[in-house]
Image (cartoon, rainbow, N blue to C red):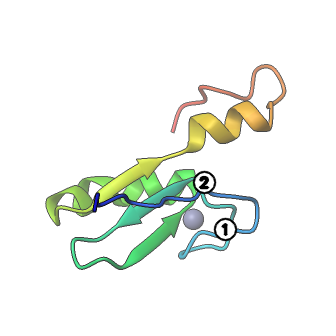
């Protein structure tokens, strides 16, 4: 029996645990619990979560692909 992690892509109904915005980042804690963050909070918490050995899956690129942003709005300084 293979151990396959079934990870469903984030959708528009997945919301950031912090601010309620659309989730772009899925975080799986070593204990198995799951957190969802928007791109902003994903970046904010990623360093700390990596210290905790969490698995971070950033789907922002895929979502950007599905939802093209107007020219000039990408790559803005943070
Ligand atoms: Zn957020």
x%, y% of residue 19? 61, 73
Residue 25 x, y percent position in the rendering: 50, 55
Question: How many other residues sit within 10 Å of disc 2, few (<14), some (14-19) or many (≥20)?
Answer: few
Quarter of the view holding residue 53: bottom left
Image height of 5 relative to 39, above or below = below
Name the quadrant where ligand 1 sits. Answer: bottom right
Side of 1 relative to 27 (left or right) = left
The reply, left or right, for residue 66 in relation to residue 50 is right
Mark 2 residue element = loop
Residues at discs 2 and 1 in contact (Cβ within 8 Å): no
Marker count (numbered): 2
Residue at 30% x, 77% y: name it: 32
The residue under label 2 is 9
Q: What residue is disc 1 on?
A: 14
Q: Is residue 49 left or right of residue 77?
A: left
Residue 31 or 17: which is nearer the viewer?
31
Q: Position of residue 40 (x, y in %)?
A: 53, 53
């Amino acid at each position: 029996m293979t151990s396959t992690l079934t990870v469903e892509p984030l959708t528009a109904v997945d919301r950031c645990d912090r601010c309620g915005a659309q989730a772009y980042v899925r975080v799986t804690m070593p204990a198995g619990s799951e957190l969802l963050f928007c791109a902003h909070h994903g970046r904010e918490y990623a360093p700390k979560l990596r210290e905790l050995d969490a698995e971070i899956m950033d789907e922002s690129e895929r979502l950007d692909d599905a939802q093209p942003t107007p020219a000039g709005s990408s790559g803005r300084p943070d």
